[in-house]
Image (cartoon, rainbow, N blue to C red):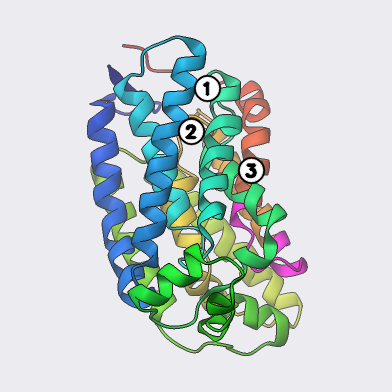
Amino acid sequence: MKLLQRFPRDRQIALSSDAVMRHVGYALTPGVILETVFFGLGVVIQLLLAIVTALLCERLTALLRKRRLSVLDWSSGLLTAALLAVSVPATAPWWLIVTAVAFGLLLGKHVYGGVGFNIFNPAIVGFCAVYLSFSAQMSLYPATHITWADSLTLIFSGSSADALSLDSLTGATQLAGLKANGIFDHPGLSPWWINLAWLLGGIYLWLRKIADWRLSLSFFAAFVVLTAIVNGFGNTPISTVQHIGLGALIFTACFIITDPTTAATGRLGRFIYAVLAAAVAVIIRQYSNMPDSMAFAVLLANLAAPMIDHYTRPNYIRG
């Protein structure tokens, strides 16, 4: 089976689904390694829990539909699991990542008919579901490197006395601290290094023509310009540079906004789609109580993508 990515006026790219999954895995690897170095092996535990949950969900839906699973089914499920595993806190309880992956795959992908038919990015659906339902658990990120033993306790002990005694190891992100009181709660360069790793992964996907660099660049540039404009007219606690280095802007631009299934299709449509997502992200991040805004901005942009395609009338390249 071939996974086709069609971009107007570009050379048609045809890669097998397992090859696409492999290359995206390569692109995610630097970020996963740095997250593990800075925050501990809890990142690896979350990744393993996500993978197991994804495999079970894909198998369950195949049994219910009485159909065989294709390589594309497996690979898309694993990709959703990996994206969610690096998005939730490394010390989040085990049931949170399980819920996120199951919700994303079952209700974000398969309820629409499976891969290629979903209008929302399954990883974003899963993330938003657990963020709205379990905001307390989703707001506590590792404040330092956490040992293997402490990671196991925080992930699997729930609200036991052992886990509660380790609460001082977690806290709000730097971005959340800036929004709340205008100062760094946990000074450090780890978010900047991790974002650099995501950027390197994104560049790899652009060079391999797996992700559309124009879509990423449009989203990033629109967000930066709009943030600079907002900062120019008001006294905001977060500078434009801090917006770039402390949140999920780079990760979203490289791995989320470029999803070919849920993004707009035509060149003009993709530009409108990216600017819309960036504008919503700026509004939410600047004026809401949420520490970050990328997931909800992309979700709303996914909702608008069919309408954007309708009015921009994209030209498809057909094999």
Is 292 magenta? The answer is: yes
Q: Nearer the viewer, residue 64 or 248?
A: 64
Q: Which residue is mark 1?
A: 314
Q: Which residues are magenta?
A: 283-295
Q: Earlier in the sequence, mark 1 or mark 3?
A: 3
State the image coordinates of residue 58 (x, y, percent, origin top left): 43, 28
- Which residue is drawn at the image coordinates 43% and 33% (left, top)? 56
Question: Can you see residue 217?
Answer: no
CB under 8 Å between callouts 1 and 2?
yes
The kind of residue on which mark 2 rests is Arg
Q: Earlier in the sequence, mark 1 or mark 2?
A: 2
Reply above or below: 151 against 94. Answer: below
- Which residue is drawn at the image coordinates 43% and 37% (left, top)? 54
Q: Which mark is residue 267?
A: 2
**How would you rate the neighbour count of disc 2 (Cα within 10 Å): few for under 14, some for 14-19, many for 20 or more?**
some
**Mark 3 vs mark 2, CA separation in Å:** 20 Å
- Secondary structure of the residue carrying numbered label 3: helix
**Mark 1 vs mark 3, CA separation in Å:** 21 Å
